[in-house]
Amino acid sequence: EHLLGRIEGKGAELNAFISVTPDQALAAADAADARRAAGQAGPLTGVPMAHKDIFCTRGVRTSCGSRMLDNFISPYDAHVVEQIQAAGMVCLGKTNMDEFAMGSSNETSYYGPVRNPWEPTAVPGGSSGGSAAAVAAGLVPAATATDTGGSIRQPAAHCGVSGLKPTYGRVSRYGMIAFASSLDQAGPIARTCEDMALMLEVMAGFDPRDSTCVERDVPRYTDALSGDLTGLRIGLPREYFGEGLDPAVAGAVDAAIDEYRRLGATFKEVSLANSHLAVPCYYVIAPAECSANLSRFDGVRFGHRCEDPVDLEDLYKRSRGEGFGAEVKRRILVGTYALSAGYYDAYYLKAQQIRRLIRDDFLRAFEEVDLLLGPAAPTPAFDFGEHTDDPVSMYLSDIYTIAVNLAGLPALTIPAGFSGKRPIGLQLIGTHFDEARLLQAGHRYQ
Ligand code: GLN
């Protein structure tokens, strides 16, 4: 009740939520109490949380930040939603996000942007800006989010909280509205690595309903938190410290390096030579996959339908024209072009080849080091409107997060200081399925 009150006040001011579900929340809290009374409570039983509005929730609107799904009440729960519910967590509502998770600032949401709790003129980051702002403002202790090219890590960094993007395949994508299927991955946003470890233990695991979900045991991430970092080998990717990095961010990262040295880690410079190709590569692959995934929103079976269509083609055109916002349309156009006959080899196929080179760069680095460390974003949170007229400058704000998705790796961001009032995030990147080590390294720093 206390947090529902905060969501009504502070939450509304920040525009952090698209839907609040007090009735379901109070019923779930009662059920959690009963479970505790019966001695069946787990560590998360009764803990309030919120889901990014990209996860299907049975009986509750699942909008994905789009007018297209403004009227969509999901008939089923996403795997992640089921898992969180089974752990006894209490969902208070659905958080605001960029439309179909396409954006880095929350400015593409049909429901209006989320404000950064630290400074109202600053963006919260995106696309999971609602989840990050909700945790930062103390509306919920934890939230779910998704990361296709940085959408967990970058908003967590901009809001001064912790965010973890697990290895591709670690968490089932069943019931998570698809943006770019070969990149999308769900993960937690919370205040600490300890909280994220608890969340990941619940979210991760095999689910046969997602064919890319990996059949592999889920470690007890919380057990891995203790233990010291003596001898941990951390790599510093040369390309992540070059031109375009804000001096305050560079200073915060340097201070973190000193702290890790004190904790016993050793450092080594490494090279991810194809890093400069990550943004162009991603902005071919992600739009290509989104153009295919979003073809299902045709005004026929669910979602927005235009009024009085004259024929089927008119129904498709107007429903999609009205239902999607400008950024989503831009991506569908770019993706359709990249996949079209005659251009496929030049764009999509080429991007897939570059993707392999980017992955190989990481794997080569991990032959020498255990983790990579660098900034989460080139600057602290920028102002509203700063990049809206120039999509490419917006896309460049993803420069340090996107390669991780192309390579399928796990990575997390944790708070590492401030520039004025605006938080700065530190990023740690691990090799495939090394979430335990990432969480341990993040935990020791916190
Ligand atoms: N900012 C990136 C984009 O706009 C990443 C979004 C995401 O991770 N969902 O595509």
Image (tube, helix red, strand yellow):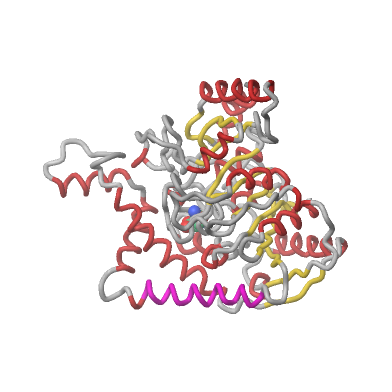
Q: Residue at x 71, y 66 (%)?
A: 371
Q: Residue at x 68, y 76 (%)?
A: 367
405 or 118, nearer to the observer: 405
Question: What main secondary structure does the magenta stretch of the protein show?
Answer: helix
| Number of numbered discs on residues | 0
67 or 92, nearer to the observer: 92
Residue 355 belongs to magenta span: yes
Residue 245 belongs to magenta span: no
Is residue 282 in view from this perspective? yes
Is residue 387 in view from this perspective? no
What is the x, y in percent for residue 404? 57, 64
Q: Residue furthest left?
A: 310
Indicate whether 18 appears above or below 285.
above
372 or 110, nearer to the observer: 372
What is the x, y in percent for residue 285? 42, 66
Look at the image and give the residue range highlighted in magenta: 347-365
| 322 displayed left or right of 386 | left
53 or 253, nearer to the observer: 53
Q: Residue at x 35, y 63 (%)?
A: 335
| 207 displayed left or right of 297 | right
Q: Quadrant of the N terminus?
A: top right
| 288 displayed left or right of 318 | right
Q: Residue at x 52, y 32 (%)?
A: 93
Indicate whether 389 appears above or below 278.
above
What is the x, y in percent for residue 317? 21, 49
What is the x, y in percent for residue 387? 50, 56
Indicate whether 405 appears above or below 53.
below
